[in-house]
Amino acid sequence: MTELTFRFAVKEDVSTILYFIRQLAEYERMSNEVVATEELLEEWIFEKQKAEVLFAVADGKEIGFALFFHNFSTFLGRAGIYLEDLFVLPEYRGKGYGKAILSELAKITVERGCGRLEWCCLDWNKPSIDFYLSLHAVPLSDWTIYRLTGNSLLEMAGCTEEKMPG
């Protein structure tokens, strides 16, 4: 494994962040669902500071990324870190970089005094599931994720507009 360093994304990295998001979406067979733009990412990640991005850098090139944000556990009484996206470019897989990114994120979690690091994985993604299990991550089989989005979200919010307020 080539020496790996980490750096937090800055506003000038929005095109690189969007590139990684699109690469991940292609891998997950969800490219048609990506509506993020550089402008939206700049607003929500850097202006509103709702998420953070950590890049893994090898040979002077960003080869992987983790997009994460804080959540909160009422049972633990403190924040945790939720990993929304983890992606390593295909040519760098199988070399320990994914584990190194998770290790760095675990360090950040501990340094910030957070109680846990958690994420979701698609049911069909056996390589990732096997990888997470090898790290002793525990699948929460007794929990089901629910989501409101689009028109269902607008209806629940009582909005009559066709688009999200903004």
Image: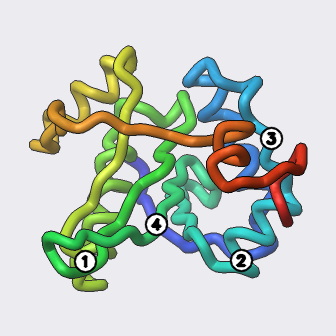
- Reading the image, the residue beneath label 4 is 5
Amino acid at the residue labelled 2 = Phe
x 13%, y 41%: residue: 138
Q: Earlier in the sequence, mark 2 or mark 4?
A: 4
Name the disc covering residue 35, or none.
3
Who's the residue at 23% across and 38% down the image? 143
Are discs 2 and 3 less than 8 Å apart at CB?
no
**Label 2 close to label 1 by CB (< 8 Å):** no
Residue 20 visible, this angle: no
> Sequence order check: which comes first, mark 4 or mark 3?
4
Disc 2 + disc 4, Cβ < 8 Å: no
Q: Nearer the viewer, residue 120 or 159?
A: 159
The residue that label 2 is drawn on is 46
**Which numbered circle lies on residue 114?**
1
Q: Is residue 93 left or right of residue 14?
A: left
Name the one closer to the observer, 40 or 10: 40
The Cα–Cα distance between marks 2 and 1, rounded to whole angstroms, is 22 Å
Between disc 2 and disc 3, the foreground one is 3
Label 4 close to label 3 by CB (< 8 Å) = no
Q: Which one is earlier in the sequence, the residue at label 3 or at label 1?
A: 3
Which of pointers 2 and 4 indicates the residue nearer the eye? 2
Residue drawn where x is 32% and y is 21% of the image: 127
